[in-house]
Amino acid sequence: MALQSNAALAEIRDTLLETYASNDAMNQLILSHLDPRAWRAQPPGQKGGGRTIAAIFAHLHNVRCKWLRLTAPHLKRPPLLDPGRCTMKQAAAAHRRSAAQCLRMLSDALSGAPNRRVAKFSRDGWMPTWPAGGTMFAYMFSHEAHHRGQILMLAHQLGYRAHKAMYGIWQWEKLWKQAGLTTRPR
């Protein structure tokens, strides 16, 4: 029974890591299909009352870097993005780097190794820490999914069609391949 239990846990761990790897493929898909005119377009409503799409992508990357700094200081962090200056190309490259390091952090956090280096997840210096594990993964993935929804809604509100990205983020088999995974979603 213990062997079946360990195998089931290993499969769940691997599936979570594969899902996080496809997470950046979703962000890259949006970046590749986003109309460049939407990148710095001001959100509707009160002037200065919301983040641009550029600022949201910078926020996603910068928060990843904060999680790495607080939770896995032994991992190298890529430079932060300036929300007011970064280009789409810079954001895409930065996201690839921070995603790779977050995947390393999650891989250690979700391992059953007694000597793992990532044992606690710190979302922010003023927030309580959590044990590293499934909730850490869920928080990280949910944070990005929330902002992907904001980005796609904002592009729509600004009048820029993002249908290929909007539908593409649900084609997980393709995203798995784009993330370099040899398995299928399971």
Image (tube, grey):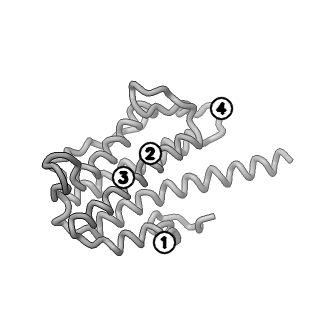
- Disc 2 marks a residue whose amino acid type is Cys
Q: Which residue is mark 4?
A: 114
Calculate the distance from the C-alpha at mark 2 to the C-alpha at mark 4: 20 Å
Calculate the distance from the C-alpha at mark 2 to the C-alpha at mark 3: 17 Å
Q: Determine whether, in the image, residue 138 is placed left or right of residue 65.
A: right
Point out the tag, 2 or 3, that comes first from the N-terminus.
2
Q: Which residue is mark 2?
A: 102
Point out the tag, 2 or 4, that comes first from the N-terminus.
2
Point out the tag, 4 or 3, that comes first from the N-terminus.
4
- Compared with residue 172, is residue 110 higher up or lower down, i.e. above or below? above
Residue sitting nearer the eye, 151 or 169: 151
Q: In terms of secondary structure, where does tag 3 sit?
A: helix
Circles 4 and 3: CB atoms closer than 8 Å: no
Q: Which residue is mark 1?
A: 171
Calculate the distance from the C-alpha at mark 2 to the C-alpha at mark 1: 22 Å
Mark 4 or mark 3, whichever is nearer to me: 3
